[in-house]
Image (spheres, rainbow, N blue to C red):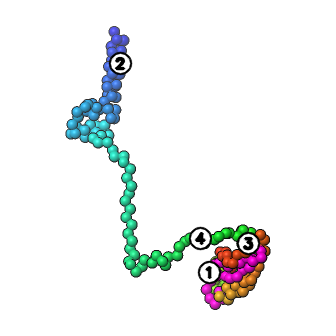
Amino acid sequence: MSRAVLAIGAALVIGLGVVLWMLSRPGDSASASTPGTNADEAPAAASRTGRRHSATAPDTTPTTPTVITHDHRTGSNTPAPDLVEPNTPVKRDRDLPSQLTFEVSRGIKVAVEQCGSLIPAGERSGPTRLTGSIDVSIRDQVATINGLDVAITGSTGASVETAKQCVVQKSLGLQSPAADQANIEHYSIEVSFRMP
């Protein structure tokens, strides 16, 4: 008989444990699963289960933030459209081979190396560079430097103009072979060299 009482007691304890486990599970309360629950009972059920139930579905529509840009310039500070230089590359009928432009600019580089010592270290405010363009013509398969439009940056003082004139004088008239190239009157080559 004691075995029968022990089995019945164990069954009751297990049954009671299952009932308590089912009642304590979050999200599965009787009031939340019963249809027709009014709105006053939902917060009470939410506080028992630890979850908040929403009567409406969450909004998942993507939104783009609105950005407002303010232009604080007055009429006198805005540049006129015709004063703004276009940032377009030079249009050419043809391009010279890179080897030819290298040979032409090599003569300029030699002049820059020779004339760079005319600028003393005291007049240099940073990296000193010669930048600008050179005008080249080709006649009878010989490329000749006809003009330079260059500036020296990174230095100030009277010696900058002296060094610039030195580079121009040593570069004008330099010639390079231009094999298999047709005659051309003006061709501009952009240059930028570090001054020693």
* Secondary structure at numbered mark 4: loop
Residue 155, quarter of the rendered image: bottom right
Q: CA distance from mark 2 to mark 1?
A: 97 Å
Name the residue carrying label 3: 182
Q: Is residue 100 left or right of residue 157?
A: right
Nearest to N terminus: mark 2 or mark 4? 2
Nearest to N terminus: mark 4 or mark 1? 4
Q: Amino acid at mark 3?
A: Ala
* Secondary structure at numbered mark 1: strand
- The span shown in magenta is 131-160
Predominant SS of the magenta segment:
strand
Identified at 34% across, 28% down, the residue is 21
Nearest to N terminus: mark 1 or mark 3? 1
Q: Is residue 147 magenta?
A: yes
Identified at 64% across, 78% down, the residue is 132
Name the residue carrying label 2: 10
Residue 170: percent from left, percent from top: 74, 84
Question: Which residue is at the front of the view, 20 or 164?
Answer: 164
Residue 105, quarter of the rendered image: bottom right
Q: Nearer the viewer, mark 1 or mark 3?
A: 3
Question: Which residue is at the front of the view, 96 or 182?
Answer: 182
- Compared to residue 38, the image places residue 97 above or below, namely below
